[in-house]
Amino acid sequence: MLPIKNLFGFRKNKGLDKSIIQKNPYRNNTDLNKRQFIKKGLLGMAGLGGLALASKVAKAGGLVFNDGSTQAAGSLEGTSIKSTSETGGTKFLREDGDGSCSWQAADIIKGGDIASASPLVIDTDGSYFNVTGTAGFAAMTVAADRQFTLQFDGALTMTHHATNLDLPSEANITTAAGDVAVFQSTGANTVQCIAYTKADGTPVVSSGVTASGCSVYRNTTQSIPNATHTKVEYNTAIYDLLGEFDSTTNHRFVANATGNYLVMASTYFTDMGATDNYNMHIYKNGADNVVHLKISGRSSTSLTVVGIVQLDATEYVEAFVYQGSGGAINTYGSATGTFMHVQRLS
């Protein structure tokens, strides 16, 4: 690589080297302002072929490069000239406003579309690309130290890899049309996704707690025998988010996932004697080991119990009642009297 002074034809104590910078045929002035091209710390640049100078040429009558191209004086002022050989990715030579110039990182440039493939090959004609097609990938072919943005035109699957393709959720991501992701290559073919924006505005990674719960009730009366712990058969669902409540056979809530669940159960009785005993229980996996309520009865009274129950996947909760009136009595069939609510908390 030529030193900066030799690059522009300056030789110590010898002025201009006309073999590199020649007199513009349209102007007689070859007295170039050397200060425009020399900046402390800028030791060298790529060869003149394919390189144009992005600096104010205050006194120049124009430039003639060794590839035969010419440039009129002053027409480069305030512009940026692309270099594809500068280390650290594509950079630009920018006039700094003080008569000198320096290499600067490229702004975002829209490159050509990239057809999806495995691995996905990142082009060098820009830093923002549309990815077409639906072929998934688990790696990219890209030089080190590049930051680039991909906009996906359709659905494909990016497969997470701790080194080759590190994704925000540490899990695979299925794209949708309009999704945009920003990537940084920390090494050759080693890529980390540092930002991902979904077109519909939803987060890539949720809070981690899947909404789970139900509200069910008994829509007809149920006869509760004397002195017997009897399951309340809630048979109608107002809502059941994940289909976890069995309202036809076992009348129980079965957790799909491990978590802490808030459980509320209620039963409304008729004809409760003033001295009779009545109990309400929440059972876990068929055992009375959660919470219960015991009262001495009174006319037309409801029983309600509330507790937080830790459930693993496939474990279940049910509601049981007991009455000691001496004979069978009925519950009301009502969404406001005989009901059960379950909501996952964490």
Image (cartoon, helix red, strand yellow):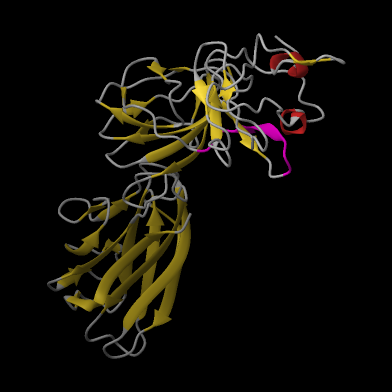
Is 245 left or right of 194, judged from the image as shown?
left
Q: Is residue 43 located in the magenta-colored stretch of the structure?
A: no
Q: Residue 39 appears in which quarter of the rendering?
A: top right
State the image coordinates of residue 166 (x, y, percent, origin top left): 52, 27
Write the start and end of the magenta stretch as one range.
98-107
Residue 250 visible, this angle: yes
| Residue 56 location (% of width, % of height) | 64, 37
Quadrant position of the N terminus in the picture: top right
Seen at 46% across and 58% down, the residue is 345
Residue drawn where x is 39% and y is 44% of the image = 257
Residue extending farthest right: 13
Residue 93, image x, y percentages: 61, 30
Q: Residue furthest front?
A: 28
Along the viewing direction, whichever of 48 and 257 lies nearer the viewer = 48
Residue at image position (42%, 49%) is 203
Residue 233 visible within the image:
no
Q: State the image coordinates of residue 64 (x, y, percent, origin top left).
A: 56, 19
- Vertical order, 318 against 35 (above or below): below
In the image, taking residue 132 as reference, residue 334 lies left or right, namely left
Q: Nearer the viewer, residue 274 or 117?
A: 117
How many circles with numbers are drawn on the protein?
0
Judge left or right: residue 57 versus residue 199: right
Q: Is residue 73 above or below residue 223?
A: above
